[in-house]
Image (cartoon, grey):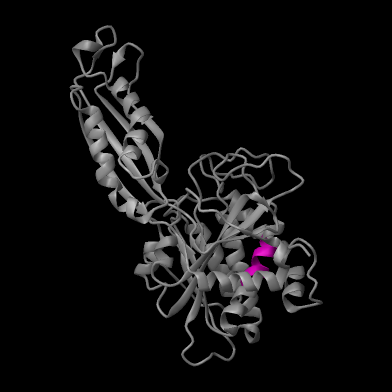
Amino acid sequence: MTATDSAAHGDRPIDSWLAEHLEGLIAFRRQLHAHPELSGEEYATTESISERLSLAGVPTRRLTVGTGLIADVLPHRPRSGSSALAIRADIDALAMDDEKEVPYRSQVSGVAHACGHDVHTTIGLGTALYFAHHPDELPGPLRVLFQPAEERVPGGALDVLHDGGLDDVGAVLGLHCEPKMPVGAIGLRSGAISSAADMVCIHLHGPGGHTARPELTADLITIGAHIVADLPALVASRLADAAQVRIVFGSIQGGDAANVIPAKLELRAAVRSPIAEVWERLPRLVTDAVDSIVEGTGATHEVDYTHGVPAVVNDAEVTDTVRRAACDEFGEDVLYEALQSWGGDDFSWLSREVPGSYIRLGVHDPAMTQQLDLHAGRFDVDERAIGLGVRLLVATVREHFAE
């Protein structure tokens, strides 16, 4: 049996409920996709989630930052002293253009749900709504964290923690679209599943001058080129293993004319490591390496290094709970061992506070030959993943409280 097949369990409440409500969940996802909002600006998104939960009688409270919700779904017969299980669903979009030609294409110029957060939000909403309509099937308290600003360093998960989102929570689950795997595939991994992700901004300054006489000034463009070309290898050479760090520049700003050497230049890069000990050392390693490259060039510089998020480390016991639930719901053949990614996610702040598991959900339509990565302008998902994600989380909630 595959996850995309009809459920082989008979006419269960979850199957009947999805048969009735899946079309509405897909419509909700498409509404979010067409009206994306950047980190910290998710006001309409928050209101849309709140409206649907309120209609189902689910109490919510908005985060003090103004966006994001904490929703509590309570069992019909609560167990005495039972800690809640939390599900994190990130709600923000990316600052980029949506290049797809679909009816639900982003209507907001320069903003797009190209990371699947609209799908995560819809699955979290669907799980909350299912148990709100079937409280007798909920063995213990469920909390869904509709978290803002995952894409902004150091992440909106810290706002969730600040507002007590994990108070009285015993474990937390996160779920992320995986466009490199077909719809129905579920990726699990105990231990580290993501990498630490930081940001560095390097400011170069000089007197400026004429491109005909670069020897008379500090040639910031050339200096910047050396930083881009040499910094990654120089930092890696100071580690025991060069594969423990990855530095990639995403922005270079400076200069307005071909015949003018600019007086300032700004370079921005992402700095990543899968190793916790290396992550702690990176600010000093990067700063020292930039110092050595710029020294003697006649330029002055500042390095603004921002620690972003640590690596997500999955708890073995919580991950085994997800594994058992997935096997019972879909069969073993849908599972694969997820690799540790170089990508980062602020879910790590939550899973450092309570045991957690971060799940990868296949969303690639096998009928499509091209596999687009996250953050691609034409990124989209096979929307069958929404119903499968709800089934997985519903099964995991039951398995968690059955222990």
Q: Is residue 274 left or right of residue 72?
A: left
Q: What stretch is highlighted in magenta?
A: 386-393
Coordinates of residue 291 in the picture (x, y in percent): 22, 33
Q: In which quarter of the image is residue 400?
A: bottom right
In-image side of 267 versus 80 (left or right): left
- Spot the residue most to the top: 212
Residue 266 image-quadrant placement: top left
Residue 36 visible, this orientation: yes
Q: Which residue is drawn at 59% across and 89% down?
A: 76
- Kindly identify the residue that appears in the image at 61 percent across and 74 percent down: 396
Which quarter of the rendered picture does the C terminus lie within?
Answer: bottom right
| Residue shown at 28% from the left, 49% from the top | 281
Task: Report the residue at 74% width, 43% height from top.
Answer: 368
Question: The N terminus appears in which quarter of the rendering?
Answer: bottom right
Vertical position of residue 389 compared to residue 304: above or below:
below
Q: Position of residue 207 (x, y in %)?
A: 19, 20
Q: Main secondary structure of the magenta part?
A: helix
The question of residue 92 being in magenta is answered with no
Residue 388 is inside the magenta segment: yes
Q: Relative to the observer, which residue lies in front, 62 or 22? A: 22
